[in-house]
Amino acid sequence: MHYRNLKRCGDLKVSEIALGCEGFIGKSVDEFKAMLDRAMELGINFIDMYTPNPVFRDNMGAAIAGRREKMVLQGHICAVWENGQYLRTRDFAKTKAGFEDQLKRLGTDYLDVGMIHYVDSESDFEEVFHGEIVEYCRQLKEEGKIHSIGLSSHNPIVAKKAVETGLVDVLMFSVNPAYDMQPASEDCNDLWNPENYNTGLTGMNPDRKALYELCERENVAIDVMKVFGGGDMLDEGLSPFGTAFNEYQCIEYCLTRPGVVSVMAGCHSIGEIEKIASYYAAAKEEKDYSVVLSRMDKFKFRGNCMYCGHCAPCSVGINVADVNKYLNLALAQGEVPETVADHYKLLEHHASECISCGSCEKNCPFGVGVIEKMKKAVEIFGY
């Protein structure tokens, strides 16, 4: 297992492969514990707990008893249980009671990430960030009851506004190759509406690209939901592309996006947990998402660096994908942020070492003009 930092949360490291909680709902306490035991044996230490289901919370509390410090817990604020079902709320009294219930049932006095639940509309953003909810989150963080403030969203424009407040440390966002082409919408159902894929779409939507780059610059950690599109991406008959990706291609795609630190997979069994954890043992060819994206006629990715790594090996050792990533971050900002400059400086080889041999361009499945990008990087970074 590999780990990445939640960058605004000190030295807290989370597993790149993490768990969504939907597969644990409805399990007995023994089944729940067996699944979590196996996940932890495989090095998974990060779990999202969006559900306010009291049985889930009780089972989670029993499963982590005596080893709370070994898990990074992401719990949701504004998700409550009412009349036997889940409810998203902005009512302060309900929100406060739901949070306190969560800590009590989990048997802990803090959450590593307190995730403001599901903000997709502009009006909801205004209510949350100019009302009692955000102040409550500030208070919880000051009291140490949450160690970082998170936000979950499917809308890149609203998510970007939230990140720009400077209050959000962690963003839970829906990421996969299909959703990344779709324009922003206040209705998350648009992401999986087949009609929205009937016309040709051209590469990554610019609002999503800008969001990921902003998070990378501002050290806001993205943990990914909907990595498999609810399973649609893995099924040829349901995939918007008309062809199936495998689990490893979906995970690899997400982990190569700027800002992403972890992928939350909804596993329903020990076997499914073992399957996603075997990502690291999979052959390079099994993880290669470019073989799907580059062969599509209807959905155009040509000319855009997808950070897939096919440009390697560079004859002088430049990590071309990373240079392109930092170049894009600087271009999007209109200047070179200090963090981006530092990341670029730490690269073992820089764009100025490019000898224009062209091997990277021959290898690139998306037809990116790499040599010109290396020249632009020298212009921007100075070396």
Image (tube, rainbow, N blue to C red):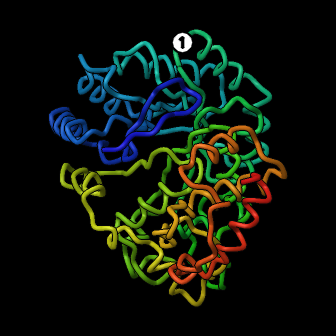
Outermost residue, top direction? Answer: 143
Whole-percent x and y of residue 143?
Answer: 58, 9
Q: Nearer the viewer, residue 303 or 207?
A: 303
Question: Going 65% across and 60% down the picture, which residue do you hit?
Answer: 351
Based on the displayed image, in which of its 4 quarters is residue 170 positioned? top right
Q: Is residue 335 left or right of residue 303?
A: right
Outermost residue, bottom direction? Answer: 297
Question: Going 58% across and 23% down the picture, which residue do you hit?
Answer: 94
Outermost residue, right direction? Answer: 334
Q: Nearer the viewer, residue 283 or 32?
A: 283
**Quadrant location of the N terminus in the rendered image:** top left
Whole-percent x and y of residue 24?
Answer: 29, 42
| Residue 243 vertical placement versus 115 (above, below) | below
Q: Is residue 125 left or right of residue 74?
A: right
**Quadrant location of the C terminus in the rendered image:** bottom right
Identify the residue under disc 1: 144
Question: Going 72% across and 39% down the picture, which residue do you hit?
Answer: 162
Q: Is residue 21 visible?
A: no
Q: Residues within 10 Å of mark 1 (few under 14, many from 20)?
A: some
Question: Going 34% across and 16% down the picture, which residue do you hit?
Answer: 107
| Residue 213 vertical placement versus 371 (above, below) | above
Q: Looking at numbered disc 1 in the image, what kind of residue is underneath it?
A: Gly
Q: Nearer the viewer, residue 59 or 112?
A: 112
Whole-percent x and y of residue 18?
Answer: 37, 44
Q: Is residue 2 left or right of residue 327?
A: left
